[in-house]
Amino acid sequence: MLGETCLKKYVQLYLVSIAIMIIGLIEILLNKTNLSQEFRGIFELVVGVICFILAIISQVKFNANRKQSERELSREYDERDGLIEGKASQFTMTVLMIVTLMIMFLTKWITIPTNNALFFIVIFCGVTNLLAKKYYERFL
């Protein structure tokens, strides 16, 4: 399953890089009179070649590390991980309610734009969830 997904990803990378190279070649061949278009074609050709090389390098690196990646991804989900997720989610929801009530209370006296308030809540919950998971992993 993991191999099929990555194979599709690399096929897409190869196709895109080849398409960029073909577009660059077409612009070079068809626009011999216009120097700026020819330069643009050369630039696209170089970008396509670089993308193709990067796709090859990333596929080789992935194949070298494939066994290690599969071992890490196939790690069993045990009950301790479920307990940690549940405790961290419960703590994050409690903090979310407190922060929301604080912002609602503060908006009576201070004008806070909605985007800023929501951004603050999202960032605060993300950090709280991360810290709660670290805390519960250490002490459970």
Image (cartoon, rainbow, N blue to C red):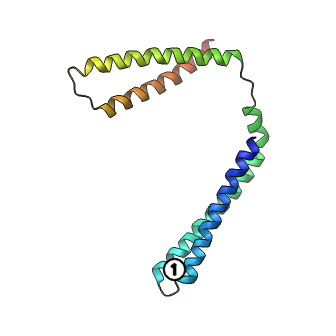
Q: How many marks?
A: 1
Furthest toward the top, the residue is: 140
Q: Circle 1 — which element?
A: helix
Q: Quadrant of the N terminus?
A: top right
> As displayed, is residue 51 above or below residue 125?
below
Q: Quadrant of the C terminus?
A: top right
> As displayed, is residue 114 above or below residue 11?
above
Furthest toward the bottom, the residue is: 33
Q: Which residue is mark 1?
A: 38
Nearer to the camera, 2 or 81: 2
Q: Residues within 10 Å of mark 1 (few under 14, many from 20)?
A: many
Q: Residue at x 54, y 71 (%)?
A: 43
Q: Residue at x 59, y 69 (%)?
A: 46
> Which percent across, then down, holds residue 130?
53, 24
Q: Quadrant of residue 15?
A: bottom right
Q: Residue at x 70, y 51 (%)?
A: 8
Q: Is residue 82 left or right of residue 102?
A: right
> Which percent across, then down, holds residue 4?
75, 46
> Which percent across, then down, holds residue 50?
62, 64
Q: Amino acid at mark 1?
A: Glu
Nearer to the camera, 140 or 30: 30
Nearer to the camera, 50 or 19: 19
Furthest toward the right, the residue is: 67
Q: Is residue 23 left or right of residue 77?
A: left
Q: Is residue 130 left or right of residue 54?
A: left
> As displayed, is residue 22 above or below residue 69?
below
Q: Quadrant of residue 85?
A: top right
Q: Residue at x 48, y 22 (%)?
A: 128
